[in-house]
Image: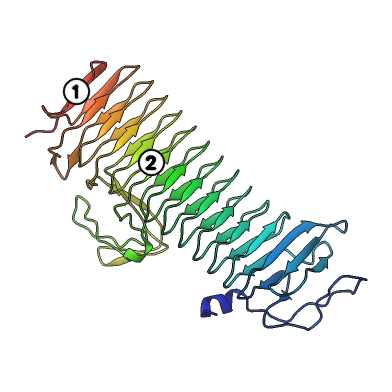
């Protein structure tokens, strides 16, 4: 067990429970792999095998928890209303399953293996670990991290934060104003309804980079968009911002006024960042027009969209509405690649266009950078 997982499941003094016929109760017992109560937090420690946990409401207004650890039959734990407010589950190895259909906050770590994590009706934290995991967030402002493996992630209503992690992931963000970071690998992201921000490539192992602003100051980010995977991002309804990163990406804005970019690099700062030698505690977000490589396809769909091609031979299709299409710009000059721009219905703006670029004739304005 890692030190992180030990702390994750570390109990305090177990609270006493009243015995009922046919129902397992928690006195002062704590087994190496099992269940304990720390205050109002229920701790469930898995095994090296396949474990299963089902949490449902009961007639007492509390919850019933059915735990099946590898090699043992199911055991029911029953709690009155107010006895539990949160659940923590650590899966270890094996293909583990946990489902939370209660109003208790679930924090779950699947560990190694192909795990299934299903959150409840409040803000849950679900981390898949290694393996090809299935994660479902449901309602609430959830935090989901697929971690290693080819994961499938669903979230429902709520403003969710989703990290696909390594592997070829599929993310369905659902309703709400979500932030989705695809991570390394060939990811497909369906942002769903709401005003979403989707980043194709994200690598937490990159530590930090230095980004110069126009005054020459330097910043230390905690999140860096890197990698060169081939991603597919779908914005769907709402005003979305989709960033492809390196690689040959496909971005579909859907309905709403969208911003699609194969060029932008976005960095977010943590609670402290360095600004000209001093530390400031307020988090900020900075976006720069650093060109990303790759032959990308960007489709705006309905709405007044902004599409940025960046480096590479890109195809930009504005769709319905008055769109802004940028053929390509890399650090103060045009990218030198042949791009294809299609305004489609509506009066559109074509910018940063070179002679080698191909456009349709449904435009309102064309501009290019000097030189």
**Residue 358 position within the rendered picture, expressed as x and y whole percent measured from the top left:** 18, 25
Residue positioned 90% across, 74% down in the render: 19
User: Is 154 situated left or right of 328 in this image?
Assistant: right
In this view, the residue farthest toward the right is 21
Q: Is residue 225 above or below residue 280?
A: above
Residue positioned 72% across, 54% down in the render: 101
Residue positioned 33% across, 31% down in the render: 306
**Residue 349 position within the rendered picture, expressed as x and y whole percent measured from the top left:** 26, 23
**Residue 48 position within the rendered picture, expressed as x and y whole percent measured from the top left:** 60, 75
Task: Quadrant for residue 325, please give it.
Answer: top left
Q: Pointer 2: residues within 10 angstroms few (<14), some, or many (20+)? A: many
Residue positioned 73% across, 55% down in the render: 102
Q: Secondary structure at mark 2?
A: strand
Residue 366, label in figure: 1
User: Is 146 situated left or right of 74 in this image?
Assistant: left
Residue, disc 2: 242
Q: Is residue 106 above or below residue 25?
A: above
User: Is 271 situated left or right of 306 in this image?
Assistant: right
């Amino acid at each position: 067990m890692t030190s992180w997982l030990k702390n994750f499941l570390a109990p305090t003094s177990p609270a006493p429970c009243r015995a009922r016929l046919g129902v397992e109760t928690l006195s002062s017992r704590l087994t190496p792999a099992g269940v304990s109560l720390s205050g109002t937090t229920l701790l469930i420690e898995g095994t090296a095998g396949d474990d299963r946990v089902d949490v449902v409401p009961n007639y007492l207004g509390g919850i019933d928890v059915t735990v099946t650890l590898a090699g043992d039959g199911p055991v029911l734990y029953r709690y009155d209303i107010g006895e539990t407010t949160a659940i923590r589950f650590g899966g270890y190895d094996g293909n583990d399953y946990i489902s939370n259909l209660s109003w208790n906050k679930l924090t779950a770590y699947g560990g190694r293996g192909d795990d299934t994590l299903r959150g409840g009706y409040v803000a849950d934290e679900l981390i898949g670990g290694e393996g090809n995991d299935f994660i479902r967030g449901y309602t609430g402002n959830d935090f989901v991290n697929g971690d290693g493996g080819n994961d499938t992630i669903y979230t429902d209503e709520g403003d969710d934060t989703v990290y696909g992690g390594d592997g070829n992931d599929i993310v369905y963000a659902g309703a709400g104003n979500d932030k989705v970071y695809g991570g390394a690998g060939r990811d497909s992201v369906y942002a769903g309804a709401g005003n979403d921000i989707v980043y194709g490539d994200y690598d937490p192992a990159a530590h930090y980079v230095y980004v110069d602003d126009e005054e020459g100051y330097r910043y230390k980010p905690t999140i860096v968009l890197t990698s060169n995977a081939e991603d597919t991002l779908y914005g769907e309804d709402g005003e979305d911002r989709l960033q492809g990163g390196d690689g040959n990406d496909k971005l579909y804005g859907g309905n709403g006024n969208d911003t699609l970019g194969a060029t932008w690099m976005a960095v977010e700062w943590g609670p402290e960042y360095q600004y000209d030698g001093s530390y400031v505690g307020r988090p900020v977000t900075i976006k720069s027009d650093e060109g990303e490589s790759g032959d990308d396809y960007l489709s705006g769909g309905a709405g007044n969209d902004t599409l940025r091609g960046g480096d590479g031979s890109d195809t930009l299709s504005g769709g319905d509405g008055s769109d802004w299409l940028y053929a390509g710009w890399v650090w103060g000059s045009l990218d030198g690649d042949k791009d294809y721009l299609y305004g489609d219905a509506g009066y559109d703006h074509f910018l940063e266009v070179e002679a080698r670029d191909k456009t349709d004739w449904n435009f309102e304005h064309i501009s290019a950078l000097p030189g």
